[in-house]
Image (cartoon, rainbow, N blue to C red):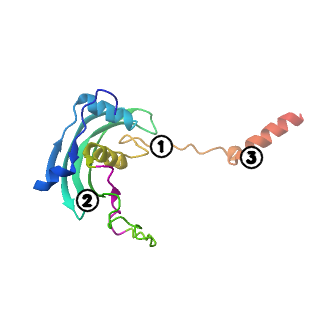
Amino acid sequence: MGPGVTWAPIIRLGELARGPVSLDLAPDAAARAAIAQDLDLVALPQFTAKARVAPWHDGVVLSGRFAGVVTQVCGVSLEPFDQPIDGEFEVRLVPAGSPNLPGEDGGELTLDLDEADPPDLLDGDEIDVAAYVVEHLALALDPFPRKPGVEFEFEDPDAAQASPFAALKTLQDRNRN
């Protein structure tokens, strides 16, 4: 996020010694504008999240929900429009050298699509909760947004234009004359 934006909920691992930590996140207008810019949105008029950070083996599990409204540009009409968005997330984080990191024993790493994602590596003793929330917001965005009710209209080409080579043939015929 840009300079001067103060929405950065950070949890230190030591804070979890007393048990899980719950957070209600509601970035202010400046933070929402910075998030919108980072995610290539027109705007982020509303956004809130609830997160919980709890001990898990030798690391932590970060889970929660987010909801809001994003303003995107329609891929068909090129008009901006508002769209509600929400989602859930769960991320496990472990320190370097953890036996819970996949492939740390030198064995082969196998992935099962039905299982939870492998844990992320903790970088230090701080967890940037806001970064994980924004990452999951980005994953929930429609990469090809379409304003409700807008349809892509496909024009049926003439028989002469049915093939992309028909235009080349027309040009070739013109050059011969």
Describe the element under mark 3 as helix, strand or loop: helix
Give the main secondary structure of the magenta stretch. loop
Say above or below: 139 vs 1: below
Say above or below: 32 vs 48: above
User: According to the image, label 1 marks what residue?
Assistant: 152
Residue 41 shows in the view: no
Quadrant including the N terminus: top left
- Of the numbered discs 2 and 1, the one sitting upstream in the chain is 2
Nearest the viewer among 6 and 70 is 6
Nearest-to-viewer mark from 2 and 3: 2
The reply, left or right, for residue 8 in relation to residue 17 is right
Q: Residue at x 37, y 40 (%)?
A: 147
Nearest the viewer among 137 and 23 is 23
Say above or below: 83 vs 120: above
Disc 1 residue crowd, few under 14, some 14–19, many 20+, Cα 10 Å:
few
| Residue at the far bottom in the pictured view | 107
Say above or below: 21 vs 44: below
Residue 165 numbered tag = 3
| Inter-mark Cα distance, 2 to 1 | 48 Å
The reply, left or right, for residue 159 in relation to residue 154 is right
Nearest the viewer among 37 and 92 is 92
User: According to the image, label 2 marks what residue?
Assistant: 59
Quadrant including the C terminus: top right
> Where is residue 105 shown, x and y percent of the image?
40, 71
Q: Residue at x 39, y 68 (%)?
A: 113
- Of the numbered discs 1 and 3, the one sitting upstream in the chain is 1
> Where is residue 96 shown, x and y percent of the image?
35, 58
Identify the magenta region: 114-124
